[in-house]
Image (cartoon, rainbow, N blue to C red):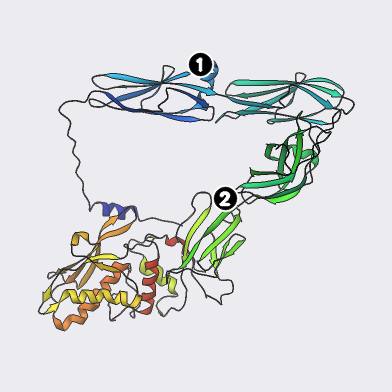
Amino acid sequence: MKSTIPLLLLAALALLAGCENTTTMPEDPDPLEILYSTPEADSLTLAEDDSMTFVLRTQGAGAVVAEVYLEDVYLCAMDSFTFRAWEYLDLQAQRPNDYLSLKIDVQDSLDAMSHTWNVKILWGFTSFPESGELVNVLGQTLMFQLGLEAGGLSPEYEYFVDGELVESSGEFFYFHALTIGDYEVTGRVRAGGHEWTRQWTVEVQPDEPVDPPETVTELRVGPGDGPGRMAVAFKPPEEGLREPVHSFEIRAFPYLIDDEQWESAYLVGFEEATPGAEEERFDLEGPEAGMTLYVRVRSVGVSGNTSEWCSPVLGTVAGYTVQGTVINYETGGPLEGLNVSYGDVVSMTDAEGHFYCDDVPLFEEGGAWDFPGSYYDEEGSEIGQWFDLIDSRAVNDSLVYQMGTFPTQPFLSTWYSDFLEYFIHVLRPPPATFHLIRPMYPITTYIPEHVNEGLDYPTVVLEGMDIWETETGLDFFVRVEDPEDAVLVFVYDDTTSITGITKILEWDFTTYTPIKMEITIKSTATPDFAFGLYQVVFHEVGHAIGFWVHSHDPNHCMNKTNLLDAPSPDEVRLARIIYHMEPFADLSYLLHD
């Protein structure tokens, strides 16, 4: 699980800073004045699924009170208001040819003014076929469709044949002519207390003056251009004596079903035909990213007559793209030849450490595959065993990772079961968190002058800092001349009984990094204690780098009692790793495989 820095820690750190806030009122009050208003146009037309934010910014004498009115009905007390057209369909229906009046009134202690906008909501009702007089052949299918773009409302569709309700399950109606004669088909859609109707007359003939269109051929189905999209391509029927094609009905289902059931399968698209096209290709929204489906297509003529369904073809909706880069935290360089898996999709990192997994299914939280992915060396021979660590999570619809890892071996200490246990123990400051806490590198450092009985303190301090840079080959520090410019400041104290101590004094809470630290050193050391002072300094410098907790291993310089003259190989390795990791990296993704 994830966790953040405990609230008590943040609260305690926040107490280190204070603030003062005073307000001076002007001697002469400002007159009420409109600073700006938006939108600039006073008359607007919105579709029913549109929204628009109206703003009237003012300044005046003391507090300015603003109120919003729609058709002189009070809505709220604000100087901005988001008008969602679908919430006022009923009001617009009462005035189908008029604009609605939206007004913001403002007043202060001396004056009042207002601004008014006129808004009209347009409905989006559509129907098919376009002709109202149709001819159908006995035994063939005729398709009707109603559409209503009604914003946040859910339209209700009904179809009647000769006044009798025959269909109320959706926007499509398939008319099967069973007897010869004339029929009246009426479609009705309701939303928000309003309704729209469309009527057709259908003459069912015994002969076949015009055959329905042919079905499509050479259907191909595959992932579309983005997550959750499906590409459908096919060869349309040739133009001839049959009814011209108006559109194509594309439906999908997870398994094979009877022909009669396809009319209620998932509608992928109802797409208009392209005149003269040798191939039709549509990139459509699928039911679910990464899902595998059977797809069938049939032609729909200009009069609504439909062809037979084409043969089913199995295809996959585009899944989510999982890509990113894997680096070796110990060296900071890319990691090549590492297998990266996300579910059943596997990729291998290239020379730049980049991997790319395409068509990955997106599983719901708590599902069987609810994990961000893993990466590993399948053979274990080229690059050995590695710890899995993920720094950052999903970005937008595709999953993009900046990932890193580090080798498990060799590990010299016998005081921990493995390097991971040592890693977690040393890097977690009290109170314990699941994030890497370290300053930004290089650490700006101020070293004041001090000499005691001939022992030059800055020389010893520099040696204690340099040993970390020499052993790791990295630049951890940069010296500055002004303590105000420094993140790390050395302080010499002749009253302390402690030879050395490191404190975090101030945090940047936007990045959760220390921005002011202090190392206090006992100032009374003599030249014969120069080596001991050096051991104290480079131990405390280790804390400042990010080794917050003392190591249990007496063979480590970060043991509570340091007996070494340089960091151990385990500590050098750990310093290199945290140097190449991002500050505040989430350690909850650190998994031991």
Count of marks overlaid on the render: 2
Looking at the picture, which amino acid does disc 1 mark? Asp
Q: Nearer the viewer, residue 291 or 130?
A: 130
Instruction: Determine crowd level at label 1: few under 14, some 14-19, many 20+ residues with C-alpha closer than 10 A.
Output: few
Up-down: is 531 above or below 46?
below
Q: Which residue is mark 2?
A: 364
Q: Amino acid at mark 2?
A: Glu
Does dot 1 land on a helix, a strand or a loop?
A: loop
Q: CA distance from mark 1 to mark 2?
A: 47 Å
Q: Residue furthest left?
A: 453
- Residue 515 position within the rendered picture, expressed as x and y whole percent measured from the top left: 27, 59
Q: Does residue 550 sit above or below 13 in this rendering?
A: below
Rendered location of residue 586, percent (x, y) = 42, 59
Image-quadrant location for residue 112: top left
The residue under the point 35% across, 78% down is: 553
Q: Is residue 289 left or right of 236 when viewed as pictured? A: left
> Which residue in the protein does label 1 denote?
98
